[in-house]
Image: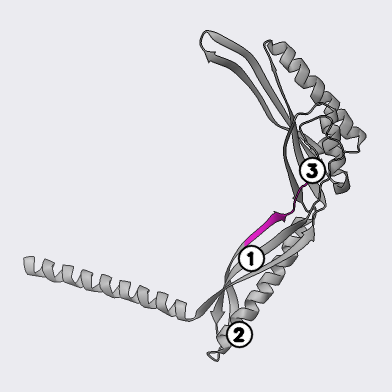
Amino acid sequence: MYKLLKKYLFMILTVTFMMNLGSAEAREANQVNTISVRSRVEQAVQANTAVITVGIRVQDSKLQIAQDKANLVMQNLVQEMLTLGVSKSDMQTSDFNLNYNKEDKNSFRGYTLENNLVIKVRDIDKAGIVLDKALESGANQILGINFTYEGAEELKDQLLKLAIENGRKKADIVASADGRIAGRLLEVNIYTDSYQKAEMRVNKMMLDSSALGSQVLAGNVVISSEATLLFELN
């Protein structure tokens, strides 16, 4: 009985080893009969939209007074943006923070309230004017300016198609060195992105309400699409 069981276990182990070996050989065969390439295409375009974040920061010993001051500035700011032709849907509150200021449990220093507004400026030539009007309205924080390209998604799709076409060409070139050709596309992984190559220059102190005539220079936005492609080799 013991000899029979020992023989049976040996047979199981042998079969398992052969199956694993077969799987390894299959994986090796698949590696030999496929080719993987990576292709990236990018294009620089002139930025056509500015996204500006401005805000108001006020301090007061009374919470209601701090809120009233911030609300008045924000109301004036929104109204000025509407007058400039900025759509209400292109304005959005990004942060609203209220801090209770104290040095210790017996020392109260008042309240600090911060309210920030993100403004999308579709007429990029008005970006400098938007900054000036924000300061005139009482904003005392300029938190950032980003430049984007409206239409980026459509351009990414076009570049992705080109990246895939270029990837197949690369695969054919490499395969031809062995007298073969790239066949079916078995797998594709894609990645798209856009990043800013732009600069901002302001000719006066932006946190001063007298800082009028802000000059904003928008540069290029780089749109890219990348694909990793796995082809069958014929």
Mark sitting earlier along the chain (3/1): 3
Q: Which residue is mark 3?
A: 202
Distance from disc 2 to disc 3, alpha carbons, whole Å, reads 51 Å
Name the kind of residue labelled 2 in the image. Answer: Ile
Label 3, secondary structure: give it.
Answer: loop
Q: Residue 40: which numbered mark, if any?
A: none
- At x 62%, y 79%, the residue is 170
Q: Residue 173: which numbered mark, if any?
A: 2
Examine the rendered structure and indicate whether residue 115 appears above or below residue 62.
below
What stretch of residues is rendered in magenta? 191-202
Query: Considering the image in quadrants, where does the C terminus appear?
Result: bottom right
Which residue in the rendered view is the most extreme toward the bottom? 179
Q: Nearer the viewer, mark 2 or mark 3?
A: 3
Inspect this view and state whether residue 1 appears: no
Q: Position of residue 217 (x, y in %)?
A: 81, 50
Mark sitting earlier along the chain (1/2): 2
- At x 41%, y 77%, the residue is 28
Examine the rendered structure and indicate whether residue 35 appears above or below residue 67.
below
Q: Image check: 69 left or right of 38? A: right
